[in-house]
Amino acid sequence: KAGVTQTPRYLIKTRGQQVTLSCSPISGHRSVSWYQQTPGQGLQFLFEYFSETQRNKGNFPGRFSGRQFSNSRSEMNVSTLELGDSALYLCASRSEGQGNSPLHFGNGTRLTVT
Amino acid sequence: GENVEQHPSTLSVQEGDSAVIKCTYSDSASNYFPWYKQELGKRPQLIIDIRSNVGEKKDQRIAVTLNKTAKHFSLHITETQPEDSAVYFCAARGAGGTSYGKLTFGQGTILTVHP
């Protein structure tokens, strides 16, 4: 089975711009989560989607949004980029809507805001 | 919400020694506790996990213990090897309310195994 696929791998944007990141989960996985990883803050939960619905949300401003499509693929959007948004954005999928199935991470998108 | 504290932040051991990383969590309703290993420039990968109805789980050189009363869990690596060098993250998943399904991570431990 192919793993979680994230595109693009690297992205450089300017302050004020917006960006869209894409994630394709493992085939059959319906839950997709997004995390922000920075050296200072570690892995911070952004949101989780299941069956095209946002089921849970972390403590990030409204500039961070996401969505999930009927094929379980997910996108994350960040508007009005700030320098502090520079980070590795990780997508993870899991097989069950409920219960304790493990998260499988993608390789991430490295976003640099200048 | 859930808060996960992880110690130590860095750990240096000699090859063949054991390594122990400890985590505490705040939400008594949390019921799932995975550990991830992240090598430099790579994605976090699950190495072992434990559910709240189990006190200990082993997988070859790796073991995890859970103390629900004290709300802490630990990762034990025996006979460490240089390829064990990486950043290790503990995490806890909430079981109810706004925490449901959300995985909260510790700050990570940089493990260095010296040959």
Image: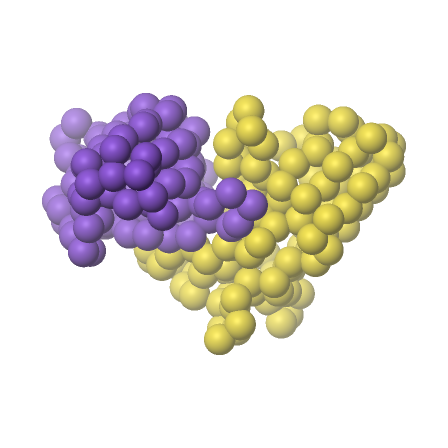
Quadrant hosting residue A13: top right
- Residue sitting at x 31%, y 39%: B115
Residue at 14% across / 30% down in the picture? B69
Q: Residue B11 placed where, x, y %?
A: 32, 27
Q: How many marks?
A: 0
Image position of A66 (left or right of B51): right
Outermost residue toward the front in this view: B115
Q: Is residue A47 left or right of residue B84?
A: right
- Give the residue displayed 28% in from the left and 50% down from the top: B49
* Any part of residue B106 in sight: no
Viewer-proximal residue among A96 and B63: B63
Image check: B65 left or right of B111?
Answer: left
Letter of the chain in purple: B
- Residue A41 lies, with reference to residue B93, above or below; the image says above
Looking at the image, can residue B114 be seen?
yes
Image location of residue B107, percent across then percent down: 43, 29
Q: B70 or A37, which is in the foreground?
A: A37
Instruction: Quadrant for the C terminus of chain A, please.
Output: top right
Q: Residue B27 at what x, y percent from top left?
A: 31, 31
Supply the letter of whichever chain is yellow. Answer: A
In the rendered view, does A113 fall on the left or right side of B29? right
